[in-house]
Amino acid sequence: MKILAFGASYSSTSINKTFAEYATGFFPAKEIEILDLKSFPLPLYTTDLEKEIGKPQAAIDFVEKLEAADLLIISVAEHNGSYATAFKNLFDWASRFKVKMFENKKMLLLSTAPGPRGGLSALQSATARFPIHGAQVLGSFSLPKFGENFAAGQGITDETLKQEFMQVIDNAKQQLA
């Protein structure tokens, strides 16, 4: 199985990228690729710009990465109650190239944030939206207060949250079998 994981953020210090990478360790895989979305630079999407330049290679490359994976692990970053702008822009360009960009891919959706809701609004939005684009969401989990509940080398430190996370992981693994 090939796993493709990323934090839906262009931040060089993305806690969502860290969280997505952490989650990969709970799945058996022959290959794990952690994407850095900064590898997909794109101009701000508008229909006028699309008419002018067509489909940018970065959007095509992103969709090809999605196509090559068996399992997608995405941790969505939240800015002001929605996806991070840069990810939303990538998503918009990719959907113009291929509306069903997730094409029946199995997906684990995550989110985290420094605050008490852990990016829950963006996670709920992704859980509702991504299946429209072909995703088979196997489960979702939001980790609140990342700085208090996650430690490098240890992972989730709060036992209750860790048990909830592991239940989501176990349910997803059963659906993969």
Image: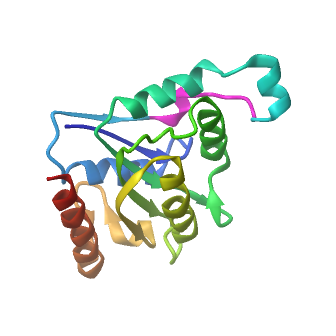
- Location of the N terminus by quadrant is top left
Query: Residue 23's x, y, as percent?
Result: 28, 54
Displayed quadrant of residue 95: top right
At horizontal 32% and vertical 47% (from top left) the residue drawn is 21
Q: Quadrant of residue 72?
A: top left
Q: Which of the pair 161/167 is nearer the observer?
A: 167
- Image side of residue 170 versus residue 60, left or right: left
Residue at the image position 44 percent from the left and 73 percent from the top: 144
Does the segment drawn in magenta span residue 43?
yes
Is 83 displayed left or right of 53 in the figure? left
- 35 or 145: nearer the viewer: 35
Q: How is the image coloured?
A: rainbow
Q: Would residue 119 be found to the left or right of residue 162 on screen?
A: right
The correct choice, above or below, for 80 with respect to 115 in the image is above
Residue located 27% across and 76% down the image: 164
Q: Which residues are magenta?
A: 36-44
Q: Residue furthest bottom?
A: 160
To which quarter of the image does residue 152 belong?
A: bottom left
Residue depicted at 29% across the width and 52% down the height: 22
The x, y position of residue 149, in whole percent, is: 35, 71
The percent coordinates of residue 119 (x first, y second) are: 53, 66
